[in-house]
Amino acid sequence: MSTAADTAAQLIYAPNVVHNQVLTSVKFISSCFAGAVAGILGLENWLGFALFITSTLFTSFVIYAVNCKGRPAKYISGGMGELINPGQDNVFTFILVWTLFFGIVHVYD
């Protein structure tokens, strides 16, 4: 029989923690690629952020369908809300890579 202590211990089960770290890394790399694409394409203002939101939603959908098998609450403590949340570091990473690639590619425009 499962007790409340067993249920609480499953929340910090090591394989689940490792799985969540991989999901965080995938979202981070997705932000980097989206920033690079926005910079190379020369997107400015809201078009760049629209690309970021589209990239975040697409990445979240792929994680939802493939990694979580349609049940994000089983793998992620916040469920679907936590899966869609881009995170502050990913937003700043996107902006940093976006401006970097924009400056490299469009320096003499």
Image (cartoon, rainbow, N blue to C red):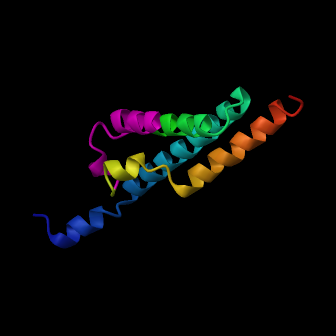
- Quadrant of residue 78 within the rendered picture: bottom left
Q: Inspect the magenta stretch and tell me whether residue 25 lies in it.
A: no
Q: Position of residue 96 (x, y in %)?
A: 70, 48
- Residue at x 37%, y 33% (from the top left corner): 66
Along the viewing direction, whichever of 77 and 52 lies nearer the viewer = 52
Residue 58 is left or right of residue 3, and the answer is right
- Residue at x 35%, y 64% (from the top left corner): 12
Q: Inspect the magenta stretch and tell me whether residue 62 lies in it.
A: yes
- Quadrant of residue 29 within the rendered picture: top right
Q: Is residue 53 above or below residue 16?
A: above
Residue 5 is left or right of residue 48, and the answer is left
The magenta span reads: 57-76
Q: Residue furthest right?
A: 108
Quadrant housing the C terminus = top right
Q: Residue furthest front?
A: 45
Q: In this view, does 62 lie above or below 90?
A: above
Residue 94 is left or right of residue 3, and the answer is right
Along the viewing direction, whichever of 70 and 109 lies nearer the viewer = 109
Q: Position of residue 106 (x, y in %)?
A: 82, 31
In the rendered picture of this protein, how many numbered marks are placed on residues?
0
- Residue at x 72%, y 30% (from the top left corner): 42
Along the viewing direction, whichever of 76 and 51 lies nearer the viewer = 51
Q: In this view, does 54 lie above or below 4?
A: above
Quadrant housing the N terminus = bottom left
* Majority secondary structure in the magenta region: helix
